[in-house]
Amino acid sequence: MEIIQGNNNVLSELITLGDYVRQLMNASKDATEVERILESNDGYKNVTVFSVIEMANITFKAKTDNAPNVGDANSHTDLLVDKQGRDVGTMKGQGWKIASLPDDSVVSWYHETAETPLGRIETAGIWNSSAIWAGQWQSLFAAGVSGDVMGKIGVRQLYQDIPREKYLTLIVLVPLDQIKSLIKK
């Protein structure tokens, strides 16, 4: 279950866009090609697609090693690498397992900072940590705050490839004035 933070049309649009980008990339398209498709087919100009492997370096205060539990907390300084294994930045942050849903899945609050060659990207929000452990992608709101990404908003999507060691990370950012749910017609 994807968590939509309230009745937020903007975040819903951004998550849908992130999911679409993942579909394109799964069809063997690289980030540059996806950016061109988004411009020519979907009207999003100057989109940033940042797809990397996140090698986790996590400090845990956790009840168990094999599942999230309410009350767990962590901090992390992860290395971001591209598909060729080159260092392309870091992702630093903290997370707290804050509640459980009626289906016993655990909800977490995260705040993270990605330092990339494109600029600094801040992420924050809630996601379903149990869904991550079940092999599902989850999304956080993201905002570019410096460099080439400043003024863009989007999502940071995460998939756990190797538990607590290796994650697949996709960040999709769009200039604020191109968010369709913000444009008054």
Image: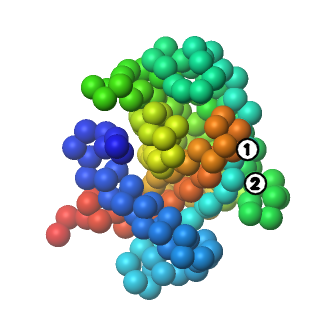
Residue 164 appears in the picture as rendered = yes
Q: Nearer the viewer, residue 147 or 81?
A: 81
Task: Specify few, some or many for label 1: CA neighbours under 10 Å numbering under 14, 14-19, or 20 or more.
Answer: some
N-terminal-most mark, 1 or 2: 1
Calculate the distance from the C-alpha at mark 1 to the C-alpha at mark 2.
Answer: 8 Å
Mark 1 and mark 2 residues within 8 Å of each other at the beta carbon = yes
Query: Is 11 on the left or on the right of 66, as rendered?
Result: left
* Amino acid type indicated by mark 1: Met
- Say what secondary structure mark 2 lies in: strand
Query: Is 116 on the left or on the right of 96, as rendered?
Result: right
- Say what secondary structure mark 1 lies in: strand
Query: Where residue 133 sits in the image (x, y, percent)?
Result: 52, 37
Q: Relative to residue 13, is residue 34 depicted above or below?
A: below
Residue 50, quarter of picture: bottom right
Task: Name the residue beneath numbered marker 2.
Answer: 81
Task: Name the residue beneath numbered marker 1.
Answer: 55
* Amino acid type indicated by mark 2: Val
The image quadrant where one finds the N terminus is: top left
Residue shown at the point (47%, 34%) measured from the top left: 129
Query: Where residue 54 sits in the image (x, y, percent)?
Result: 69, 47
